[in-house]
Amino acid sequence: MMAVRAVVFDAFGTLFDVYSIGQMAEAFYPGLGSSIASVWRDKQIEYTRIVTMSDPHRPGGSRHYLPFDEITRRSLQHTLARLGIKDSAAAEQALMNQYLMLPPFPEAADVVRSLRARGVQTAILSNGNSAMLTPLLAHSNMTDLFDPVISIDAIGLYKTAPESYRLVDSQMGHPAREILFVSSNAWDALAATWHGFTTLWVNRQGMPFETLGEPPTYSGASLTRVLEVI
């Protein structure tokens, strides 16, 4: 048990269910919805790493940077080609639009509201740019639950670049150890732990943690674990 001054959440996969998009994909491409959702997400993350790692000296950001909505579109196009699906402009746009309406996990809003009722600051650090985050939060009526909403778009370097986590330091002003960083992405929780945050990995699928370094400070099967930790 510990006292923290702020809780910072990852957005995609942590607060919002990115794999739910497989349901719409299934409607367009029967029998392939789950595969599309899985391959799309993997390629999306891979592309963020490629554009960030390609410029090791990167003053001010990567020369190859593309905002997250464009990364998401291009990774979808690659996914459809990889699965041998003939791309439809209408289906592609519908799936992209659905990314702005991803459902939050059932407990997400109540957990954040409970934290704020306790006087704990809540924020987001996301790879997503404002063109994705603003409508996503508005659609789920969660706009007023996070301050600040921090996007790596400000520096053009995706997580897990150390500079991305430093955005929290510069914008929130709390020592890293007094911030609980919450992510369902094991690689994100690992890098946040390396940065010095107190960390919580939301392990919904009961997966083993990464074997590259120390485990997160806490883990749990849902976001309600945050309330047990604080």
Image (spheres, rainbow, N blue to C red):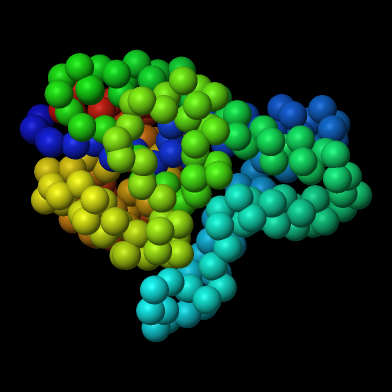
Image quadrant where one finds the N terminus: top left
- For the point 50% across and 22% down, the residue is 140
- The image shows residue 218, relative to residue 68, as above or below, that is above
- The image shows residue 30, relative to residue 124, as above or below, that is above
Image quadrant where one finds the C terminus: top left
**Occupied quadrant, residue 120:** top left
- For the point 50% across and 26% down, the residue is 138
- For the point 76% across and 54% down, the residue is 77
* Front in this rendered view, residue 66 or 183: 66
- For the point 86% across and 45% down, the residue is 89
Q: Where is residue 196 in the image (x, y as percent from the top left)?
A: 18, 55
User: Left or right: where does residue 75 sit relative to residue 177?
Assistant: right
Q: Where is residue 60 in the image (x, y as percent from the top left)?
A: 39, 73
Q: Which residue lies furthest to the right in this view?
A: 86
Q: Is residue 34 visible?
A: no
**Occupied quadrant, residue 166:** bottom left
- The image shows residue 117, relative to residue 181, as above or below, that is above
Q: Position of residue 20 (x, y in %)?
A: 62, 29
**Occupied quadrant, residue 9:** top left
* Front in this rendered view, residue 213 or 229: 229
Q: Where is residue 22 in the image (x, y as percent from the top left)?
A: 69, 33
